[in-house]
Image: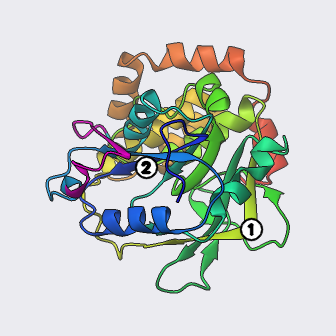
């Protein structure tokens, strides 16, 4: 444990009704060996199960709250009070291994990458390990297969993601108008690549992740998922790909969602991103052989 008031790393944990899992995560984070100074920031995004109550008198942990703004915005809120040069976003249901933090940061410090994932293993079936994501022909994320050496990945998983504060701020953080949950990791990764940054997986590091069996502790709706999906498309894709995304929307009216997006000012963001980016979506799809 090397928690400090002058941290090199800020570990940011968004929380929503995690029960005892949050306590287990923090205990693991503190127990493992590390030479890196860090702080812990917990963002309670409107929990109603008292999962953060045990943190109230913990002086070495920063606890802040958000009123149910969703995963992306809760992470952004954590960055606002973070002091570290590097940011590590963690889910509230993880277990860590010794020296995971310095090994995860190595590609960032050495200039090999700008954002990094470890291998993320199922805590129940520990041989089931994901190594970042890619997209299939319908833009459904799927885990990369194992590789022995560090490699660049099209998409990072937000369950344990390291990035420098400088890069995070340069791309504007996580999407500020997503709802609840869904696509925030994919949008952030895509934005990093299009803006000229690199996403990498460090496969020699393994983090254990508790995967819930189809019963998240907060409500996820198709309306919110489809909003996030189409907002990602409007932010970064060509008109042809936007149309393809609209055709994939189910359980919602894509025309209505599109009208609401346009009324929200999405075109201003789109125009800003188009001017900022170094690569376009064609480049991304070709580079990573995404068939979309």
Confirm whether residue 253 shows in the render: yes
- Residue 256, position as x, y percentages in the image: 32, 32
- Image side of residue 266 versus residue 168, left or right: left
Tell me which residue sits at (52%, 86%) in the image.
125
How packed mark 1 is, by other alpha carbons closer than 10 Å (few <14, some 14-19, many 20 or more), is: many
The magenta stretch spans residue 65: yes
Residue matched to label 1:
203
Vertical comparison of 187 with 103: above or below: above
How far apart are the alpha carbons under marks 2 and 1?
Answer: 24 Å
Vertical comparison of 209 with 53: above or below: below
Please name whichever residue, 290 or 127, is drawn nearer the observer in this view of the structure: 127
User: Closer to the observer: label 2 or label 1?
Assistant: 1
Q: What colouring does the structure picture have? A: rainbow
Q: Residue 182 got which mark? A: 2
Tell me which residue sits at (57%, 20%) in the image.
270
Tell me which residue sits at (71%, 50%) in the image.
105
Range drawn in magenta: 54-69
Confirm whether residue 244 shows in the render: no
- Residue 135, position as x, y percentages in the image: 65, 56
What is the number of callouts on the image?
2
How packed mark 2 is, by other alpha carbons closer than 10 Å (few <14, some 14-19, many 20 or more), is: many
Vertical comparison of 5 with 287: above or below: above
């Amino acid at each position: 444990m090397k928690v400090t008031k002058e941290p090199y790393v800020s570990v940011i944990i968004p929380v929503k009704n995690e029960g005892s899992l949050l306590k287990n995560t923090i205990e693991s984070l503190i127990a493992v060996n590390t030479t890196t100074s860090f702080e812990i920031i917990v963002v309670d995004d409107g929990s109603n199960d008292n999962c953060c109550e045990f943190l109230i008198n913990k002086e070495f942990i920063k606890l802040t709250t958000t009123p149910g703004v969703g995963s992306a915005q809760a992470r952004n809120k954590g960055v606002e009070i973070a002091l570290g040069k590097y940011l590590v976003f963690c889910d509230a249901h993880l277990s860590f291994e010794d020296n995971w933090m310095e090994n995860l940061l190595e590609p960032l410090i050495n200039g090999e990458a700008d954002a990094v994932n470890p291998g993320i293993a199922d805590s129940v079936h520990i041989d089931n390990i994901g190594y970042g994501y890619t997209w299939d022909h319908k833009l459904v994320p799927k885990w990369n297969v194992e590789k022995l050496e560090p490699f660049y990945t099209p998409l990072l998983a937000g369950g344990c993601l390291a990035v420098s504060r400088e890069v995070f701020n340069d791309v504007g953080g996580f999407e500020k108008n997503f709802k609840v949950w869904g696509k925030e990791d994919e949008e952030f990764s895509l934005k990093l690549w299009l803006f000229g940054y690199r996403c990498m997986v460090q496969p020699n590091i393994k983090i254990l992740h508790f995967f819930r069996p189809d019963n998240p502790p907060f409500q996820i709706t198709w309306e919110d998922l489809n909003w996030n999906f189409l907002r990602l498309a409007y932010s970064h894709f060509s008109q042809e790909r936007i149309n393809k995304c609209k055709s994939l929307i189910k359980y919602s009216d894509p025309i209505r969602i599109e009208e609401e997006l346009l009324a929200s000012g999405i075109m201003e963001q789109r125009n800003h991103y188009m001017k900022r980016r170094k690569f376009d979506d064609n480049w991304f799809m070709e580079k990573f052989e995404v068939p979309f």
